[in-house]
Image: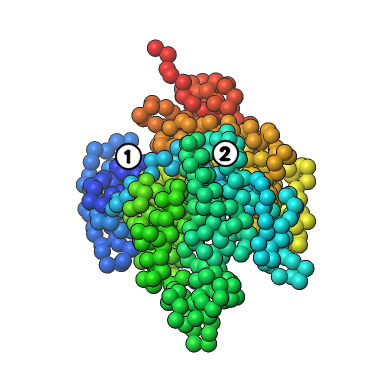
Amino acid sequence: MDYVRFNPTDEFYKSIVGAVAEGVRFGIRLQINQIVDPSQVKLVVYGDDNVFKQEYVMYKDASGDGYDNFLADVQLKKGLYWYYFVMDGVAYERYIGIGADNKASLYFEQVKPWQLSVYKKQYETPAWLNKGVMYQIMVDRFCATGETVATEDKILRHWGEQPFYREEDGVVRNRDFFGGNLRGVISKLDYLKSLNVTTLYLNPIFKAYSNHKYDTEDYELIDPMFGTQQDFVELCSEASAMGIRVILDGVFNHVGSSSKYFNREGKYGTGGAYRDPNSSYRDWFTFYPDGSYECWWNFQSLPRINAHNKGAQKYFTSPGGIVPRWLKAGASGWRLDVVDEIDDCMLDKIVSSAKKEKPDAVIIGEVWEDASNKVDYGVRRHYLDGSQLDSVMNYPLMNGIISFVRDGNEQVLSKVVFDTINNYPRFVRNNLMNILGTHDTIRILTNLAGNRLDNAPKEAMARTKLNDYQYKQGCKLLKICAVLQYTMFGFPCVFYGDEVAMEGYKDPFCRCCYPWGEENKLMLDFYRRLGELRKMSVFSDGDFHELVAERGVYAFERVDTETETKAIVAVNRSQDAYELYLGETYEDVLTGRKYSNSCHLQHNGYVILKKLPSKA
């Protein structure tokens, strides 16, 4: 028996689910078992600044089913808030907050509150973002077309060899290349279209020494090993003709020490901040009396840009700056690398500059945690208040899906879903970049079925491959992960090669070459079928309702009221069969099988069901 009932992800209890807009009035309903019989109930809301605090005496409404309803109307300014309930006239736990299972729970003291985000929308989220599939490409490792010439002391290797994890002297230089280029990407646009890719996300393509290009040398030039600006313009133009947009990786927190801006190695003569105290770039960086300088995570090769410097801000965000310049050349947005470490004074100008150049440009942030309440260097960020990010990389969901599919823990996934629905604005939730792996993580296939080598040396990772059993098991589990990734709120982002079951441990082994001619065709066909599902609006814009999260089973419903479409997705990772109640007639879009009233799920079973029209 529940003494109290409250679920902010249900409109019955909170009239606006998720974050709410500034100045919009919404209702909160708490249900209390009539056995408790409090003399008064109050809703307590306090601000993240620990200054604002408001108490609302809740009015009693019609009761039923043995419970009394207590209601309050709330209206707040933009900000991050927390709330809980207090009951007067009771002799035991009088506080009501969120419990470990996301349900309302009684507290004697130290009540745990719910989060409440209030936003003030300044920019419209691009309508095109969540309509299909995003595909992430590291250009050097995707496809090589024509002749690529190695520059400087870089090493050009044979396609498909394992990337170097260190050189003979033990130093990691990231200078081995495989010849992938922009013309190679252009040559594979038909392939990407077959996956229903509508957004192409390119890892950094600007001139840099390393193969990963996160050590930018010149933001104004495409790296010559990747091609030219004309190649980029052509890529954007041909992709656009096929309904595919291109977004770029914006590395605006740091540059390479060999860059023209810093020039520690002297590659650019006597100029640059490191060699010339009078350089126009000098104040971009923070130098210390002993000659050292501030770096990104203490990597001496990555001097950090001072976001407060007006010259740096102007270079990136002025009308002719880097951000609008590449949008004008054809890009449709930016994924911002380590956005946590870009101060608001720079981030606000990056966003404003992009939106001014292209109002429907997208800004996606690399955030590994809950982006609605992120604290960075002691500062509460406001990414999702309507004036900054359109979306973030959904690492929490990635971890939740993996925990469920690999380990059978549906509660971790349920908790992630609850927090996202409760904390994020709907316009962000339905535009989240849902990943299963990236250039910074273990390949999803290896993560699901490989040996756990998280703390092992790179030598062990280099020689460890999936055996036949692990590979087959990994493919089964990868399909389940992909089903969840493609049908959850947000949109799927596929790291190149995951769709053909590439394997590999963390960097650099997750960054191998795409295996053209040696693809897992069955997995590729499965991803193409899932890509077709992304053409259904119910999966891009539909409401989301969790149905089941118990005993190794997870199921949810998507509902699009405009098209009157309803879909149910269910996965069984338990060892036992599970009977899922439907109540209506559905058809599995993957198999064509029809189900009436219930669906029988075996171990590792999954379904994507679309409701069939009721017979007159």
In the displayed structure, would residue 301 be above or below residue 477? below
Q: State the image coordinates of residue 189 (x, y, percent, origin top left).
A: 57, 39
- Which residue corresponds to mark 2? 189
**Residue at left 48%, top 58%?**
250
Q: State the image coordinates of residue 537 (x, y, percent, origin top left).
A: 43, 32
Q: Nearer the viewer, residue 572 or 558?
A: 558
Displayed quadrant of residue 186: top right
Helix, strand or loop under label 1: loop
Label 2 to label 1, Cα distance in Å? Answer: 46 Å
Displayed quadrant of residue 431: top left
Q: Quadrant of the N terminus?
A: top left
Crowding at mark 1 (Cα within 10 Å: few <14, some 14-19, many 20+): some
First-in-chain label (2 vs 1): 1
Q: Residue furthest top?
A: 616
Residue 12 has which mark? 1
Question: Does 227 sit left or right of 356 as displayed?
Answer: right
**Residue at left 66%, top 65%?**
152
Question: Does 16 sit left or right of 175 as displayed?
Answer: left
